[in-house]
Amino acid sequence: RHNLNYWQFGDYLGIGAGAHGKLSFPDRIVREARPRHPRDYLAAAASPAQRARGPVNRSDLPFEFMMNALRLNEGVPASLFPERTGLGLGEISARLAEGRAEGLLSPAPDRIAPTERGRRFLNALLHRFLPA
């Protein structure tokens, strides 16, 4: 239950030393990382410019989304991809079709879910969604 938000590519705040966060905005998705060592964390708290923060590249969004969503046996509704990434399903339709043809993804068009075989070969399945 704790990880469902991550696996559904939801947002989360990183609070405390070593914490990570992901925040979605209408035009971008930003990842944040806090310094791990408490001394460094406290120093960075005094100067927000020292925090590690950066946008997720648009080309990385399919992989980032799938890396999380395909950890769920039941997958996610296909509508969640455009909702959470801001990208259309057309951007990954060829890769979804390949995964379905090879029996790695469920054939249901309204869900993105790994099959039993897809779960066994998750790394190979995820590799399809890496930027070209």
Image: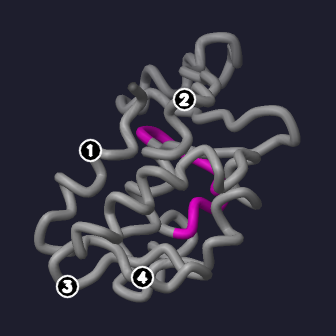
Amino acid type of the residue tagged 4 in the rendering? Pro
| Residue beneath disc 1 | 127
| Residue beneath disc 3 | 116
- Looking at this view, is 22 or 123 the one in front? 123
Spatial CA distance of label 2 from label 3 is 28 Å
| Residue beneath disc 4 | 107
Q: In this view, does 89 lie to the left or right of 124?
A: right
Mark 2 is surrounded, within 10 Å at the Cα level, by few (under 14), some (14 to 19) or many (20 or more) other residues, namely: some
Marked residue nearer the N-terminal end (2 or 1):
2
Marked residue nearer the N-terminal end (1 or 4):
4
What secondary structure is marked by label 2?
helix
Spatial CA distance of label 3 from label 4 is 12 Å
Q: What stretch is highlighted in magenta?
A: 8-18
Residue at 57% from the left image edge and 70% from the top image edge: 5
Compared to residue 123, the image places residue 42 above or below, namely: above
Residue 52, which numbered label?
A: none
Q: Where the C terminus falls, by quadrant?
A: top left
Q: Residue 131 appears at what percent x and percent y?
A: 42, 29
Marked residue nearer the N-terminal end (2 or 3):
2
What secondary structure is marked by label 1?
helix
Depth check, mark 2 against mark 4: the one in front is: 4
Residue at 76% from the left image edge and 33% from the top image edge: 28
Residue contact at pointers 3 and 4, CB within 8 angstroms = no
| Residue beneath disc 2 | 59
